[in-house]
Image (spheres, rainbow, N blue to C red):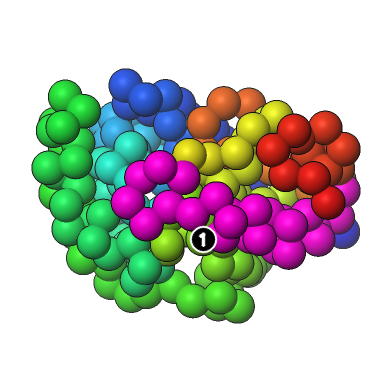
Amino acid sequence: MSSKLKVEQLVVGPLYSNCYIVWDDNTGEGVIIDPGDDANDILKRVRELDITVKFILATHGHFDHVGAVAPLRKELNAEFIAHKGDFFFLEDGKNAARRWGVDIEKPPKPDRFLNEGDTIMVGKEKLEVLHTPGHSPGGVSFTHNSMVFCGDTLFQGSVGRTDFRGGSFEEMTESIKTKLYTLPDDTIVYTGHGPSTTIGIEKQFNPFVRL
């Protein structure tokens, strides 16, 4: 099934996080996934694309994925949505960033919380929510047809760190095996850092999580 959703990747902030602008080309309505920093650059691109951002989504609450939420939410009047399991990261976001030598505006409290099985409308298209904990307790992935935005759960040839607060390698392995690896092999994996990959390639070659 071909997707009507368009995807643009921006690499933001000192940790080179991937931020994604995703929109329905038919309606011009979109979402921003993981705006970690560089709010002005993201805003500039949204305006160049001439889309209306309805929601700001977080795959997880680490500061390098939510650092630009506060200014973008105000500027775009968009709802901020995340999983409750990572609320403590959002609360501590400004302090956490400072510990890494980064200055951000404190992330706002989400307008609503995500749960497994929720759907988010992007124009007339749907993003479906998978709860994929492990890198963090409230980690989620967003799927649509042959694409998945998985934050820092799965990378090209690697997986996310689990040595942060609330991390669990066992949980992450379970999330990857039972949620991500069950997606079709041609599913494009839009990662939280680094290049995109596919589910089929990771199932075959990823050295950290084997089926």
Residue lying at 19% horizontally and 41% vertically, measured from the top left: 96
Which three-letter amino acid code belongs to the residue tagged 1?
Pro
Q: Is residue 166 magenta?
A: yes
Q: Quadrant of the N terminus?
A: bottom right
Quick one: 56 or 166, which is closer to the camera? Answer: 166
Q: Is residue 74 above or below residue 163?
A: below
Q: Would residue 123 be visible to someone looking at this image?
A: no
Quick one: 206 or 139, which is closer to the camera? Answer: 206
Q: Position of residue 210 (x, y in %)?
A: 80, 45
Give the SS element for disc 1: loop
The quadrant where residue 157 appears: top right
> Dot 1, how many residues are within 10 Å of its Cα: few (below 14), some (14-19), or many (20+)?
many
Q: Is residue 90 magenta?
A: no
Q: Position of residue 83 (x, y in %)?
A: 40, 67
Q: Position of residue 92 (x, y in %)?
A: 16, 52
Label 1 sits on residue: 133
Residue lying at 72% horizontally and 44% vertically, measured from the top left: 209
Q: Which residues are magenta?
A: 162-185
Viewed as shown, does residue 121 lie left or right of 197? left
Residue lying at 24% horizontally and 56% vertically, measured from the top left: 90
Quick one: 210 or 200, which is closer to the camera? Answer: 210
Q: Position of residue 188 (x, y in %)?
A: 74, 43
Q: Is residue 210 above or below residue 13?
A: below
Q: Is residue 117 above or below residue 95?
A: below
Count of numbered circles in the view: 1
The quadrant where residue 86 appears: bottom left
Residue lying at 60% horizontally and 39% vertically, measured from the top left: 159
Q: Would residue 206 be visible to someone looking at this image?
A: yes
The quadrant where residue 64 appears: top left
